[in-house]
Image: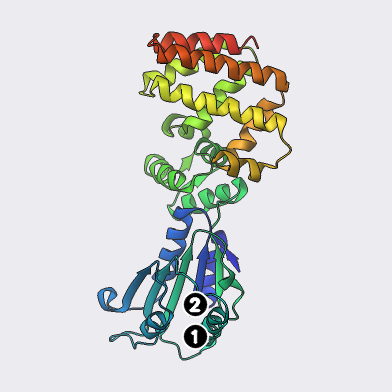
């Protein structure tokens, strides 16, 4: 098995007839598939590339794989979320897949794509790629390598800032990194990231939450004004801030680890990690009081009170919890 960060090195050293891409990051799955496809000489994509979505006909799959490519060395078959047979049929399927994977005469490159772990990774001869969300360390490593390929340099503080601003979301990071490389002459500095990269709303709220926890309401209000001044919707900001405090509450009152909490709250694990240091500044009782304040503010919004005044009052109240 290889992780996404090292996939290109793996592709340079050996070719595989069967791949399994699995993981919860769609951008990484798509990029891994793109990298693999780029190494397969199929000549005529319209004739030698087949995409099967949610297929379950095993015989059809292998018939396609065993069809000789048209005037090219290889045929590329992509099976997205292929439904595996059950029981004895599954064992038969794995045996057929193994024969394809270990064959030295195969004219096909078969790539399975799944959004979660799949047992096909254990079939002999199959190469698997872990496409789960990257850790901040790997995201930073990717940013540095990408900038180098673009002929630019970026130091670790700037790369780390970019990762954090985007909450390690590779789809956003790839876009922002490209923008920074277009802007920079030779080197990307932390100030470039600060000036050019739009902070994820979750990260912006993390900054606001830190100031509220430090009882610096005036600075928190300045941050809110900056966000609304550049187009952030007040009600959306209220919702994100509420979700943030709800997250703080669960961090302080449960014993789940970051990954479990992230799954339960449907957020990226980085969002839990960023919130941890702020959660530690509160007692559970204070966070329960904070959530009550959100309920009161929500009732006012439903009664059509001025949105800006409601949010401003809420932040002042939260800073006194």
Work out whether residue 40 or residue 266 is closer to the camera in this orientation and state it: 266
In the visual, does 250 lie left or right of 204? right
- Residue placed under numbered mark 1 in the picture: 100
Work out whether residue 103 or residue 14 is closer to the camera in this orientation and state it: 103
Residue 292 seen by the camera: yes
Which label belongs to residue 77?
none
- At 47% from the left and 14% from the top, the residue drawn is 299
Q: Which of marks 2 and 1 is nearer the N terminus?
A: 2
Label 2–label 1 contact, CB within 8 A:
yes
Assess disc 1: are there few (<14), some (14-19) or many (≥20) residues with their C-alpha within 10 Å of its C-alpha: many
Percent from the top left, x then y, of residue 273?
Answer: 64, 37
In the visual, does 22 lie left or right of 321? left
Which label belongs to residue 18?
2
191 relative to 87, above or below: above
Element on which disc 1 rests: helix
276 relative to 106, above or below: above
| Quadrant of the image containing the C terminus | top right
Assess disc 2: are there few (<14), some (14-19) or many (≥20) residues with their C-alpha within 10 Å of its C-alpha: many
């Amino acid at each position: 098995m290889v992780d996404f960060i090292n996939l290109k090195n793996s592709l340079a050293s050996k070719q595989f007839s069967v791949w399994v891409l699995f993981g919860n990051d769609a951008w990484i799955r798509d990029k891994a598939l793109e990298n693999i496809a780029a190494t397969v000489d199929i000549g005529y994509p319209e004739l030698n590339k087949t995409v099967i979505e949610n297929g379950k006909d095993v015989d059809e799959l292998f018939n396609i794989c065993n069809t000789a490519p048209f005037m090219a060395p290889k045929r590329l078959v992509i099976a997205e979320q292929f439904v595996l047979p059950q029981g004895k049929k599954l064992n038969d399927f794995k045996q057929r897949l193994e024969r394809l994977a270990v064959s030295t005469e195969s004219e096909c490159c078969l790539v399975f794509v799944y959004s979660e772990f799949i047992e096909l990774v254990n079939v002999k001869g199959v190469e698997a790629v872990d496409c789960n969300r990257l850790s901040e360390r790997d995201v930073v490593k990717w940013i540095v390598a990408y900038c180098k390929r673009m002929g630019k340099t970026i130091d670790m503080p700037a790369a780390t800032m970019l990762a954090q601003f985007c909450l390690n979301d590779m789809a956003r990071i790839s876009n922002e990194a490209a923008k920074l490389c277009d802007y920079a002459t030779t080197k990307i500095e932390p100030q470039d990231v600060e000036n050019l990269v739009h902070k994820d709303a979750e990260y912006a709220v993390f900054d606001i939450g830190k100031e509220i926890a430090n009882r610096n309401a005036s600075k928190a209000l300045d941050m809110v004004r900056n966000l609304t001044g550049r187009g952030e919707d007040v009600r959306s900001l209220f919702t994100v801030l509420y979700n943030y405090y709800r997250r703080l509450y669960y961090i302080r009152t449960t014993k789940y680890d970051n990954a479990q909490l992230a799954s339960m709250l449907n957020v990226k694990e980085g969002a839990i990690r960023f919130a941890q240091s702020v959660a530690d500044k509160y007692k559970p009782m204070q966070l329960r009081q904070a959530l009550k304040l959100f309920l009161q503010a929500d009732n006012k919004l439903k009664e059509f009170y001025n949105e800006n005044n409601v949010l401003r009052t809420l932040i002042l109240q939260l800073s006194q919890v």
